[in-house]
Image (tube, helix red, strand yellow):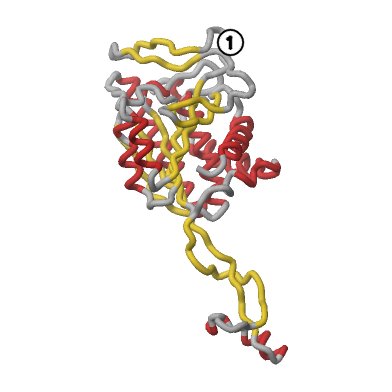
Amino acid sequence: MSAALEAPGVALGAAALIALRRVALTAQADPVLAALPGGFATRRKGHGLEVADMREYVAGDDLRHLDRGTTARTGRLHVRQFQEERDRVSLLVADFRPSMFWGLRRAFRSVAAAEALSLLGWRIVEGGGRVGLLALSAAGTVIVPPRGRSRGMLDVIGGLVQAHRDGLAAMVSGDGKEPPLDTVLPRAGRLVPPGSEIVIASGFDAPGAGLGDALTALARRRSPRLVLVTDAQTTAMPRGRYPVRLADGRRLRLRLGGAPPAQDRFAPIAGRDALILDAGETVEQTARRLVAGFAEAGAP
């Protein structure tokens, strides 16, 4: 690839996404942040290994939880109470189709989508959850099964970088396709168990006629959340959908231009609210918008 395609904001690097861990965790100082990991329905895994409290035995308590040390010291039966573990599983869906390789200021929309998903992913794994990845590009799909802890997030970052590089190369070569989003979402539902969260970061260009039905099907047993990545604050042109011709002669329409009103946090996509993110803003601004937007949206 040429030097221009390796420039910051065009190419996607693992080091930059790993560094977003600090940004994601620093943002937790904001009072509204507690609502991002919270407010999401998670599956109960049962008793954990961490002791949360100790109390006297009452009829019906599980004798396996007796604490011998406290019972011996006090002469009365005492049982341990454990911190309940919950299992939060989130699938991050990244749109790296040709229409996402576009940007007039800080970064391509594809890069901004990867940054937003990485910020969310770091918060999830730090909160004890598991993250997986489904990345869609003209070169195909990249799948990373859900895993927890930093190791799981590093696997997701590796998948993001690989899919972005492959998608950019396919677009530059003129071999790129623009598969509609509605064709990939049924596959997303099969990658995570019922009760999971599915976060889709996209420009939602070429959504496909069945996008609304696909999201409705997902919502029956999982929780889809939409993140609309735009170049929304470009002042050189009014806000709207603009025709763009690709290298292979095909035409697309992209959402570009004009800053949305301050109160306009969400945009309707296939009958659902999508949180608006601006690819031209800094990652710190993106982190704050994710926190405020997900908190406002509440539990799916």
How many residues crowd mark 1 within 10 Å: few (<14), some (14–19), many (20+)? Answer: few
Q: Nearer the viewer, residue 6 or 28?
A: 28
Give above or below for 237 relative to 44.
above
Specify whether 166 is left or right of 121.
Answer: left
Q: Nearer the viewer, residue 231 or 267?
A: 267
x and y percentages locating residue 85 in the rendered image: 53, 62
x and y percentages locating residue 288 in the rendered image: 63, 34
| Residue 188 can be seen in this image | yes
Residue visible at 60% across and 32% down?
289
Residue 65, image quadrant:
bottom right
SS at mark 1 in the image: loop
Specify whether 21 is left or right of 134.
Answer: right
x and y percentages locating residue 94 in the rendered image: 42, 34
Residue visible at 31% across and 35% down?
184
Give above or below for 255 relative to 285.
above
Residue visible at 60% across and 41% down?
24
Q: State which quarter of the image contains the N terminus.
A: top left
Give above or below for 216 relative to 46.
above
| Residue 166 can be seen in this image | no
x and y percentages locating residue 97 in the rendered image: 36, 26
Q: Amino acid at mark 1?
A: Thr
Q: Nearer the viewer, residue 36 or 210?
A: 210
Residue 216, image quadrant:
top left
> Mark 1 highlights which residue?
235
